[in-house]
C-alpha cells in the first residue's frame, strides 16, 4: 500500500503529527545518555573512553533486543484503548512492566558472572578491558530500570501519549549529565562514577513511569499485581518482535564486520555513513511509532476503513520525509565529510557512500512506517518471518559483493537490497487483509 502525495492537511495528518513530533524528540534525547557519558569519560583518558565504548555496545545490544517491551506493549494497550476498555489497557501495560522487571532481574543474575567473557567477546584490549568490566558491572544494575522505561514508554504510547516520554527523556538526560559531572569530575570516582550516574538517572526515569502508570491504575480501578496469564500474553506477543529485532541486529553486525575487513578507511567511512543513516532513521521512526499507536487503536475499535485511510497517510508521510531527507543529504554532502575527518581516502569513500544513503531514504520511509503499522496491528509473526527472509537476502549479497571487491559502495548496495526486500514483503502484507485483525485482543 503506497500512499498518495500529501496534497492537503487532514485530521489524520494532525493525529500523526501530534504523536510523531514528541516521539522524534524522545528518540533524539535517548542517545544523549551515552554521548554525555562519552564527553565526560573522555577527560579520564583513552583507555577509559574505550572501556565505555565496549561496555556501551554490550548494553545497547541487550536493550535493543528487548525493544519488544515497548513495541508489543504499545500495540496491546492501543487495541484496548480503541475498544474503549481503559481498565484493560492499563492492566496490559502493568503486566508489560512486570515482565520488564523480571527480564531485567534475570539479566543481572546471568550477566554479572559473564562480564569478563562479554568484554572479551567485544574485542577489548588489555588496557581497555578493566574499565569496560567496571562500567558494565555497575551498569547491569540499571538494566531493570532501562527495561521498565521501555515498557512504560510503550504504555503511554498505547494510551496515545508521546509527550510524557519526551519530558522523561529530557529529564533523565539532564540528571545523567549532572550526576556524571559530580561523580567523575568533582568526586573523582572515575569510570565507575559515570556508570553509577547513569544507573541513578535510569532508575529515576523508571520511577516516573511507574508513578504515572500507578496513577492511571488507581484512576481506572486496575490491579497492579502481576498476573501470570497477562505476563504470558506479553511474552508471547513479544516473541515475534524479538526474532525480528535479532535479525535486524545480525545485519548491523555483519555490515560492520564486512566494512572492517575492507580496511581502516572503509570502516571509518562506513561508521560515519551509518551514523548519518541512524540520525535520519530517528525522523522516520517517529512516524513508525505514531503508526504503532494509531493502528492499534483503530483496529481495537474495529475501524478497518479508518485503519486503511490512516495507513495511506502515514506511508505518504514516510515517502515525503524520505525524499526531503534524501535531498537534504545530497545538499550537504560536499561539506559533510570534512566535519568528521581530514583523511582524503575516508572523505572520498564517504562522499560516494552518501549518494547511496540519500537515494535509499524514500525506501526507508516506506519500510519504517509499514514496519510500525504492522507492529501496531500485532503482526509480529509475519514481521519475524519476513525480516529473516530479508536478512537471508542481505547476507549472501554482502559477501558476494565483498568477494567481488565492490568496496564500500557494494556494501551499501547490499543494504539497499535488504531494504528493498523488506519494502516488498511489508507492502504485500499491507495490500492484503490478513493483518487487519480487529478487536481488543488480536
Image: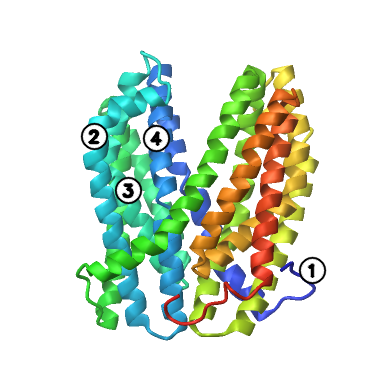
Q: Position of residue 437 (x, y in %)?
A: 53, 77
Gap between marks 1 and 4, in whole Å? 41 Å
Image quarter of the N terminus: bottom right
Q: Secondary structure at mark 1?
A: loop
Q: Which is more N-terminal, label 1 or label 3?
A: 1
Q: Which is more N-terminal, label 3 or label 2?
A: 2
Q: Secondary structure at mark 2?
A: helix
Which residue lies at the image location 42% right of the left edge and 71% below the top edge?
Answer: 76
Q: Which is more N-terminal, label 4 or label 3?
A: 4
Q: Which residue is mark 2?
A: 112
Q: Position of residue 206 (x, y in %)?
A: 30, 56
The answer to whether 424 is drawn above or below residue 341 in the figure is: below
Q: Secondary structure at mark 4?
A: helix
Residue 409, quarter of picture: top right
Res 386 visible: yes
Q: Which residue is mark 1?
A: 5
Say if mark 1 contacts mark 4, CB within 8 Å.
no
Amino acid at each position: 500500500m503506497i500512499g498518495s502525495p500529501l496534497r492537503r492537511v487532514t485530521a489524520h495528518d494532525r493525529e500523526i503529527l501530534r504523536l510523531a513530533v514528541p516521539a522524534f524528540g524522545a528518540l533524539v534525547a535517548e542517545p544523549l545518555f551515552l554521548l554525555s557519558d562519552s564527553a565526560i569519560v573522555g577527560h579520564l583518558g583513552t583507555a577509559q573512553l574505550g572501556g565505555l565504548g565496549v561496555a556501551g555496545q554490550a548494553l545497547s545490544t541487550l536493550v535493543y533486543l528487548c525493544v519488544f517491551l515497548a513495541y508489543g506493549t504499545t500495540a496491546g494497550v492501543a487495541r484496548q484503548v480503541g475498544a474503549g476498555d481503559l481498565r484493560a489497557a492499563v492492566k496490559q501495560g502493568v503486566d508489560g512492566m512486570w515482565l520488564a522487571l523480571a527480564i531485567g532481574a534475570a539479566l543481572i543474575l546471568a550477566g554479572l558472572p559473564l562480564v569478563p567473557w562479554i568484554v572479551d567477546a567485544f574485542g577489548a584490549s588489555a588496557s581497555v578491558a578493566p574499565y569496560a568490566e567496571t562500567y558494565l558491572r555497575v551498569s547491569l544494575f540499571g538494566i531493570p530500570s532501562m527495561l521498565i522505561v521501555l515498557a512504560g514508554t510503550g504504555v503511554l504510547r498505547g494510551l496515545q501519549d508521546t509527550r510524557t516520554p519526551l519530558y522523561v527523556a529530557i529529564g533523565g538526560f539532564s540528571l545523567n549529565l549532572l550526576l556524571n559531572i559530580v561523580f567523575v569530575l568533582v568526586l573523582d570516582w572515575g569510570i565507575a562514577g559515570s556508570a553509577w550516574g547513569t544507573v541513578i538517572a535510569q532508575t529515576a526515569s523508571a520511577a516516573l513511569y511507574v508513578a504515572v502508570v500507578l496513577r492511571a491504575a488507581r484512576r481506572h480501578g486496575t490491579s497492579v499485581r502481576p498476573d501470570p496469564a497477562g505476563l504470558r500474553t506479553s511474552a508471547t506477543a513479544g516473541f515475534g518482535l524479538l526474532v525480528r529485532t535479532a535479525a535486524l541486529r545480525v545485519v548491523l553486525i555483519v555490515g560492520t564486520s564486512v566494512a572492517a575487513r575492507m580496511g581502516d578507511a572503509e570502516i571509518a567511512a562506513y561508521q560515519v555513513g551509518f551514523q548519518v543513516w541512524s540520525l535520519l532513521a530517528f525522523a522516520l521512526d517517529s512516524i513508525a511509532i505514531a503508526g504503532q499507536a494509531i493502528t492499534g487503536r483503530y483496529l481495537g475499535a474495529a475501524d478497518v476503513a479508518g485503519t486503511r485511510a490512516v495507513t495511506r497517510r502515514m506511508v505518504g508521510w514516510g515517502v515525503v520525509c524520505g525524499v526531503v531527507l534524501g535531498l537534504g543529504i545530497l545538499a550537504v554532502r560536499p561539506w559533510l565529510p570534512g566535519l568528521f575527518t581530514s583523511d582524503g581516502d575516508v572523505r572520498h569513500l564517504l562522499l560516494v557512500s552518501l549518494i547511496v544513503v540519500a537515494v535509499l531514504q524514500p525506501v526507508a520511509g516506506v519500510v519504517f512506517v509499514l514496519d510500525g503499522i504492522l507492529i501496531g496491528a500485532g503482526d509480529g509473526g509475519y514481521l519475524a518471518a519476513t525480516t529473516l527472509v530479508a536478512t537471508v537476502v542481505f547476507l549472501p549479497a554482502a559477501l558476494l559483493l565483498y568477494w567481488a571487491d565492490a568496496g564500500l559502495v557494494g556494501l551499501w548496495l547490499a543494504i539497499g537490497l535488504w531494504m528493498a526486500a523488506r519494502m516488498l514483503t511489508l507492502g504485500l502484507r499491507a495490500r492484503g487483509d490478513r493483518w487487519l485483525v480487529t478487536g481488543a485482543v488480536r
